[in-house]
Image (cartoon, rainbow, N blue to C red):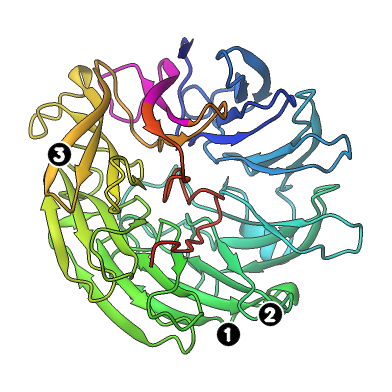
Amino acid sequence: MWARSFPNEGTNSSLRTADLNGDGTLDFVIGGGKRLHQSTDKGVIAINGRNGHILWKIATEDQIFGSATFLDITGDGYPDVFIGGRKSTFLAIDGLLGTIIWKYQIPMDTTGPLKTAHFNFYNAQLVPDQNNDGLQDLLVSNGGNVTIPPDVVAGREAGVLLVLDSKTGNVLTAAAMPDGKETYMSPVVLDYDNNGSLDVFFGTGGETISGRFYRVTWKELMLGNIAQAKMLAEGEGHGFIAPPILTDLNSDGIFDIVVNCHNSTVSAINGKNDSLFWSISIPDTESNSSLAPGNFNNDGVPDFLLYCMEGKWPENVGGVEIALDGATGKVIRKYQIGCTGFSSPLTADLNNDGYDEVLVSVNEFDCDARNFANMKTRVVVLDIHRDSTGQLGDLFDFKNIATTPWLGDVDKNGFWEMAFCVQMNTSSAIELNGMIVSMIPTKIASTIPPTWGAYMGNKSDGVFINKRK
């Protein structure tokens, strides 16, 4: 339908959608950037979903790799944009005009929990109004120090959870990670009792640093002290990077928790009492990607696709795709397609047979030689039920490192479209030097929404409600 190129730019952000201009078509927002620590005039980009034209762009001091959250705080009836990235920068942008409403950047001379929060902002979640101004507020995490080499512990400051006033960007509360570790995880939050009292799920550690996965009450967070947060899972030599999925695994009406550690250990945890349903590890692999829930069999329990890499960071090589039975944790199917990549899979019933297929953006090249200059990328379709593979769209002479595609009905024409981002090949897998954002039509009727059509789900909140039990 359209393709838009951005020379000398790149991204580690994922596409998010909202109708920014009121024309009835969803538009796209993505974070951008040049090389690490370089300023750019396209740190945040809004793209017209109808024709691919740039609606607006925002200049930033460094890469914006977070994905957008939407909420109208100006009262003009159009969604505004919240997004963060490096240099502890978090922005509120007028979604219609493309102007900055406020910019929060943690000052270096702060004390208390914010003393260590001078690194990356991750994806924000909307939470109930905390200061009685009539607007939802924002929960967001800050952490990670890109300047420290793998396996080095010194200098890795404690990550921080913050609650920000959506109207002004003022800090309503801040709390440091209970184990003093860094964080790379976007938090997930849910009102378990439907009474406004939330539970917050967050993780610590990194690719080569041990970490833990926690659950804490909203009351503890708002008091600024999460030292007593309950640990639900632990990783030795690896942390928890990918956000969890909250979904009901045992049909008791209570959301359970499914999370993957960076060492490709997946744990399913009872949301009622925090006991372990099951856990499985995929040896000799690592995973930065979020799980994708779907229905791969007919037992009514959500199943999951884990996308992981063989080898050890930063020398990861071949891709491994594992379909897991949500009831037991057992492997349903295993595929080995592609090489290094850190985007997350999607799920949807593409052929209307009652079972979900998986869409995975994979890079293909000589994995062992690690010849990044000759990457090709495509979106692979895994039909778990029939144990077959296919492809959606073309094979491109580009790479996709961390951008998750988007699937849905952009223009309400009754058919799904797929939007994705590819980047120019360079000698380094993670180097940014030009990208193309594209949207392609499909002939797949959109009678129901995709099961998991975007990074962190259709609502970007990590919550999955299984409507096909």
Q: Position of residue 123 (x, y in %)?
A: 57, 49
Tell me which numbered mark, 3 or 1, is placed earlier along the sequence: 1
Tell me which numbered mark, 2 or 3, is placed earlier along the sequence: 2
| Label 3 close to label 1 by CB (< 8 Å) | no
Q: Which residue appears at 28% of the width and 45% of the height?
A: 358
Question: From which residue to which does the magenta span run?
Answer: 415-442
Frontmost residue, 60 versus 136: 136
Please name the residue that numbered disc 3 is placed on: 389
Task: Note whether 411 is above or below 118 in the view shown.
Answer: above
- Image-based side of 145 in relation to 298, left or right: right
- Image-based side of 458 in relation to 94, left or right: left
**Disc 3 and disc 1: Cα gap in Å?**
46 Å
Please name the residue that numbered disc 1 is placed on: 228
Q: Amino acid at mark 2?
A: Glu
Other-residue count near label 2 (Cα within 10 Å), few / some / many at <14 / 14–19 / ≥20? some
Q: Which residue appears at 75% of the width and 77% of the height?
A: 223
| Residue 429 part of the magenta segment | yes
Q: Position of residue 263 (x, y in %)?
A: 25, 61
